Each structure stands twice: as C-alpha cells, then as structure tokens.
Amino acid sequence: MARQSRFTGTDGKADGRGPKEMERVPERVDRDTFRRLFETFEYTAWRLETRRGYASDRQDPDFQQFLATGSSPCDPDEPWFVNIRAQTDTGKTVGRVRIADDPPTTEQRFLLDYARHNAAVGEDIRYLWREDADGATLPAEDFWIFDSRVVALLHFDDEDNLLDIELITEPAEVVRYAIVRDAAMHHAVPYDQFAARVAGTEQRA
C-alpha cells in the first residue's frame, strides 16, 4: 500500500488540513536589515561562532594592536557597544558561544582577549573546545537566533569573508537551531574560565 501523508486523502490530493510540501527558498537580507534585528529583538539574541578566524577581525585595527601588544583596545562608544549596552540595560539577554581550536588560532586568541569588552556591556560570552563541540555534534555553522523565532544564518567564503545572511523563520528549522543553542550553552564555560585554562596550558607547554 502506498504511504499517505497525514495531510492527503486516499487519492493523494491535499485535504486542506496542512501546508503543501515545498522546497524552502532561502531569504537573503542586506546588512542594514540584519543590523536592525539587534535593535528590535524583544528578549534574547544569541550567536554560535565556529570558524577558525574572520576576515573582518583581521582587518580591524584592534587586531593589529593585539598582534603588537598582546592586548586589544576598545572604544566603548562604538555603535555595537552602545546598542548592546542599551539592550541589556533593559533586561534583554545577548550571548555567544565560541568554538576554539587547541591550541587557539591567533584570531581566536584575539577574540578571547576581546571578550572582556563584550562582557562589559552585558554580553554572556562562553567558550567550547572544538573537540567537545564535535562530541556534542554541534554543526559547523555560524548563526544568530533572535527570540527563538528568527535565525540569521551567516555564510562565509574560504577566506572567511561574510558573503550573505539568510533569514530562517520556518518553525521546525528554528527549533533545530534552538536545540543547538541549548547544547552549546550546556557544554560551554564562561570566557574568563576558558582564558585561564588556555593560559595554564601554555604555561605547561
């Protein structure tokens, strides 16, 4: 007997009780639309970072300063910091989990040092070794999830440049990313604890 969908009758035609199956067409958005999500979210904004480096970081003067001195400077009046402080001051939650290699790449070390600036404006920054992320079967995807309703999936090229941003609102897909978020948060540790572990490993080397 042919297997029937619960949304179709015995003749295989849709019975009107559910959506027709169709291939999801990616919704691409521009950078301005993406940035507005950080001003309009209601409760939570959370990111998973999985790459070994980002071209935007390597192009940042703060990165060059880190290479020269081992410490990253910070301008608290940068638009990102001003907005995130405004959002967290109202009780909203902003957080990230970053996947790090062992040993961390130079770009990952820069972000680990820079995490203190993010934390100063209210971000919850956590870290996870890549081996542990693989053990938890976390995907090698970079994304933001807003209010557990909207996912912004970030697409990069081989040189770590951000190519485009795909918005995902289909409920089952959003739930999948929310499950990834919960697993990452369960296994990750606060950035300062992770930094202490990295420093301890380097001292024993």
Image (spheres, grey):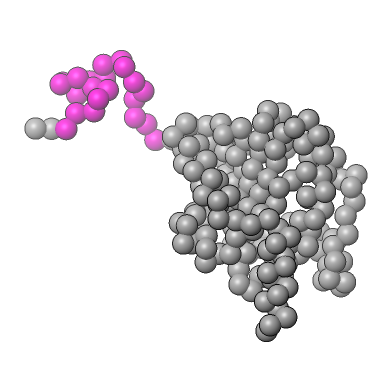
Furthest-top residue in view? 16
Q: Residue at x 70, y 78 (%)?
A: 202
Q: Reply above or below: 45 against 127.
A: above
Magenta residues span 3-23
Residue 14 falls in which quadrant of the image? top left
User: Is residue 166 rendered magenta in the image?
Assistant: no
Q: Is residue 120 above or below residue 36?
A: below
The x and y percentages for residue 154 are 60, 47
Identity of the residue drawn at 78% across and 30% down: 90
Q: Residue at x 9, y 32 (%)?
A: 1
Q: Nearer the viewer, residue 106 or 114?
A: 114
Q: Position of residue 36 (x, y in %)?
A: 72, 33
1 relative to 83 in the view: left or right: left
**Picture quadrant of residue 198:** bottom right
Query: Is residue 175 visible to us here?
Result: yes
Quadrant occupied by the C terminus: bottom right
Q: Residue 145: x, y in percent? A: 60, 39
- What residue appears at the point 37 percent right and 31 percent down from the top-left corner? 22
Q: As drawn, is 166 to the left or to the right of 135? A: right
Horizontal side of 76 relative to 189 (left or right) equals right
Q: Is residue 157 visible?
A: no
Query: Which residue appears farthest toward the left when viewing the image?
Result: 1
SS majority, magenta: loop
**x and y, in percent, of residue 181 in the image:** 55, 46
| Residue 4 in magenta stretch | yes
Q: How many marks?
A: 0
The residue closer to the viewer here, 154 or 99, is 99
Q: Is residue 119 above or below residue 28?
A: below
